[in-house]
Amino acid sequence: MKESCLHFFSQTLPIEERPQTFTNPFHYTPHQWTILAMQEVFAYLPTITEWQEALAEGKMFGVLVVETPQKEIGYLAAFSGNIDGENKHPFFVPPICDLLNPQGYFKQEEQRISAINKQIKNWESSRQYIKAIQKLSAYKEKQTQIRKQAEEAYKTAKKQRDEKRQGTISTEERLLLEKESQYMKASLRRLQKKQEKDLLKKNLTVQIFHLRIERLKRERKKRSATLQERLFSDYKLLNAEGEIKDIQTIFSENHQGIPPAGTGECALPKLLQYAYAHSLQPLCMGEFWWGNSSKESIRHHGKFYPSCTAKCKPILSHMLKGLSVEHTEKKNWELAIVYEDDFLLAVDKPAGLLSVPGKEDSTSVLSLLETKQPDQSYYMIHRLDMDTSGLLLIAKDLQTYKAMQYAFSHRLVKKEYHAILEGVVTAKDGTIHLPLSPHYEERPRQKVDETYGKEAITKFQVEKVENGYTWIRFYPQTGRTHQLRLHAAHEKGLNCPIYGDALYGKSKANRMYLHAYSVSFFHPMKEEEVFISCASHFCI
């Protein structure tokens, strides 16, 4: 029996292309069946007229190709979060928990919290509260002036007494000066105590308002925490082995702390939950973007993206149990050493190899060096993205490491990168200033953040433009994560992503075309200028 959310392909699928393993959500090339499912969703989306304005702003969708118990092949579709205030539509699988149900616990409690927010806002903006704060501020200012005048008067009198004591005075006059000093000190203390006592009285009205507001804020915090705990406990997630766990438990077992807001609302968890609940066998999946790029993240219409890590990785570690998930092939990496002395060495890191061991992949430049020479200590001075190739500097002792770290942090090391960009850069050269910060909910992605981002500066020089691609040299002045990738891809940067960039680019390639070509610095131990270069594996 056909489920309402299960769709069958409009064309016959080649059975010989049946997926042998399920897609790895965090590193994949979409299967042909996944692409066909996406195309059918793309054909359907323009027919939802009431969503067009919201869709233009951009939304992540997902498809899951499944097999029914009757061995029929179909697909499910889902969207992340809500669209235009809605989380249900007949074409797409429903949410795991309906947070928009007006009679549900979430909406009811959300309304109570909203009412508390309104009360807090009313108290904070009330005329009585504002007037009390203004009176208190004026009183503090006036009393500060009175105290300063008294202190100045005391200092002046003390100076005069000290001058008199330097001259010839009688014992009686000296005693009078001492009494005057004691009296003025006591007067200052009395003034201070009186001001403190009066301040308590004047501050009482303001404190009453503060207590009311703080009580409401404590209630809001308590309700929010309880709501979040109950919410994540209500998300009962299935997997292919028939196990059921809630989000709170999953994050606790993975030592991930409190789940981020929106956990469980992404497309793939919705798809897997529906498939398991309806005895559908997952075969392959893909998540893709529709519409314009969001303000925070660089996304391209029609491009597939890996699942987010902050929200989805812990819960998918549970939901994928029982499926045979594809794994990336292990490579036999070889490191080319392009420079070495008693203190430093520089290697030409291949694209696809980590600089240091990761959480799930222990193979890296550092591990390869340590395996080759286990008696030698190595200290990674800086890092390159896994998908970037080129020069990587490693220290052989702690003193050299610290000296080179200092040079990097004070921008004393000059670096040059070569890249090929998708698109035409019209300027011959220039400088990009775009502050960057981590996108905590979509790690490892970064974002342009002009409010909280750290300064990021890149100089560039165009070498040539050919067939819609730009060959370019980058000279980073700062060393932020994904700096060159974002400065190239962002519309406020060059608006031309690096070719093959899986996170910020448009087209898939055999690699990301970014290469650390050269590095120059003053050698802290040999006390001489050093220039090291290695040619890119693509030509500029």
Image (cartoon, helix red, strand yellow):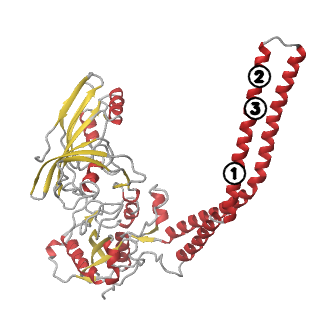
State the residue in front, 136 or 216: 136
Give the amino acid type for the residue marked by disc 1 in the picture.
Ala
Q: Residue at x 55, y 76 (%)?
A: 105
Q: Residue at x 88, y 13 (%)?
A: 170
Going by the image, does 533 lie left or right of 226?
left
The reply to whether dot 2 and dot 3 touch (C-beta < 8 Å) is no
Sooner in the amino-acid sequence: mark 1 or mark 2: 1
Q: Which residue is mark 3?
A: 153
Question: In the rendered image of this protein, does residue 51 appear above or below residue 204?
Answer: below
Going by the image, does 513 lie left or right of 285?
left
Which numbered marker is on residue 138? 1
Sooner in the amino-acid sequence: mark 3 or mark 1: 1
Going by the image, does 220 lie left or right of 324?
right
Which numbered marker is on residue 160? 2
Q: Secondary structure at mark 2?
A: helix
Sooner in the amino-acid sequence: mark 2 or mark 3: 3
Which residue sits furthest right?
Answer: 172
Q: Residue at x 46, y 65 (%)?
A: 247
Q: Secondary structure at mark 3?
A: helix
Crowd class of label 2 (few under 14; some 14 to 19; many from 20; radius 10 Å): few
Q: How many marks?
A: 3
Q: Quadrant of the N terminus?
A: bottom left
Distance Cα–Cα, label 2 vs label 3 = 11 Å
Q: Secondary structure at mark 1?
A: helix
Give the amino acid type for the residue marked by disc 2 in the picture.
Gln
Crowd class of label 3 (few under 14; some 14 to 19; many from 20; radius 10 Å): few
Residue 248 lies, in percent from the top left, at 49, 64
Could you tell me if residue 240 is visible in this image? no
